[in-house]
């Protein structure tokens, strides 16, 4: 019984630790996903501002009077377009990271489900062994009682 209690306590400690680790991992993944979503939203706002600035500079370049003004506006437009492309690349990377996070989350859920299943199976095996032990103990008591009866009969 003491051994059984020790084993049970050990198993509970293992699965409690496993659950704690899984919860911490889930929390980290959720925080990273939330951060990525916030950053994507901020980047989208920047892209919209860049598009508006590009549109304004294109309109200004169309009405510019001198070659220098037009050249300066064209340089500004190219600079803004390069920034817009950089932001779009960053957004694509964020989307890729989000897909990875979702895949990791799904994998973590599968692992957690497998661990719960393993815990359930381990409990079933433990209970089966316990029942077998109890049956063997009952059979031993019956045998002992029969032996005592047989000893009494010989005396």
Image (cartoon, helix red, strand yellow):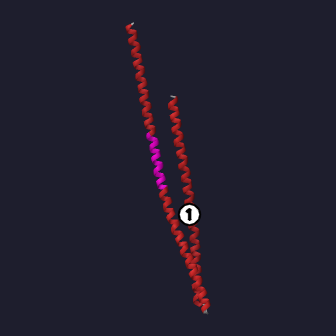
List the single residue furthest toward the bottom.
Answer: 66
Secondary structure of residue under mark 1? helix
Q: Residue 65's spot in the image, x, y percent?
A: 61, 93
Quadrant of the drawing holding the C terminus: top left
Q: Residue 87's spot in the image, x, y percent?
A: 55, 72
Asked where in the image residue 34 lies, by quadrant, the reply is: bottom right
Q: Where does the magenta region start and end?
A: 105-121
Q: Is residue 56 visible?
A: no
Count of numbered circles on the image: 1
Position above or below: 138 against 149: below
**Is the magenta region chiefly helix, strand or loop?**
helix
Position above or below: 129 against 91: above
Q: Is residue 44 left or right of residue 115?
A: right
Q: Residue at x 40, y 11 (%)?
A: 151
Q: Is residue 49 visible?
A: yes
Label 1 Cα crowd, 10 Å radius (few <14 / some 14-19 / many 20+): some
Q: Residue 70's spot in the image, x, y percent?
A: 59, 89
Position above or below: 74 against 7: below
Position above or below: 70 against 24: below
Q: Residue at x 45, y 39 (%)?
A: 122
Magenta-colored stretch includes residue 116 = yes
Q: Residue at x 44, y 27 (%)?
A: 134
Q: Residue at x 41, y 21 (%)?
A: 140
Magenta-colored stretch includes residue 1 = no
Residue marked by disc 1:
36
Asked where in the image residue 28 lies, by quadrant, the reply is: bottom right
């Amino acid at each position: 019984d003491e051994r059984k209690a020790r084993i049970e306590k050990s198993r509970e400690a293992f699965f409690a630790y496993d659950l704690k680790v899984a919860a911490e991992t889930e929390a980290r993944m959720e925080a990273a996903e939330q951060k990525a979503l916030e950053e994507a939203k901020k980047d989208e706002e920047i892209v919209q501002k860049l598009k508006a600035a590009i549109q304004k500079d294109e309109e200004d370049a169309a009405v510019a009077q001198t070659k220098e003004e037009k050249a300066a506006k064209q340089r500004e437009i190219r600079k803004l377009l390069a920034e817009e492309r950089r932001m779009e690349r960053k957004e694509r990377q964020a989307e890729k990271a989000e897909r990875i996070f979702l895949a990791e989350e799904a994998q973590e859920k599968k692992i957690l489900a497998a661990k719960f299943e393993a815990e359930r199976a381990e409990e079933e095996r433990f209970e089966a062994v316990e029942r077998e032990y109890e049956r063997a103990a009952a059979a031993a008591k019956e045998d002992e009682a029969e032996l005592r009866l047989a000893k009494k009969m010989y005396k």
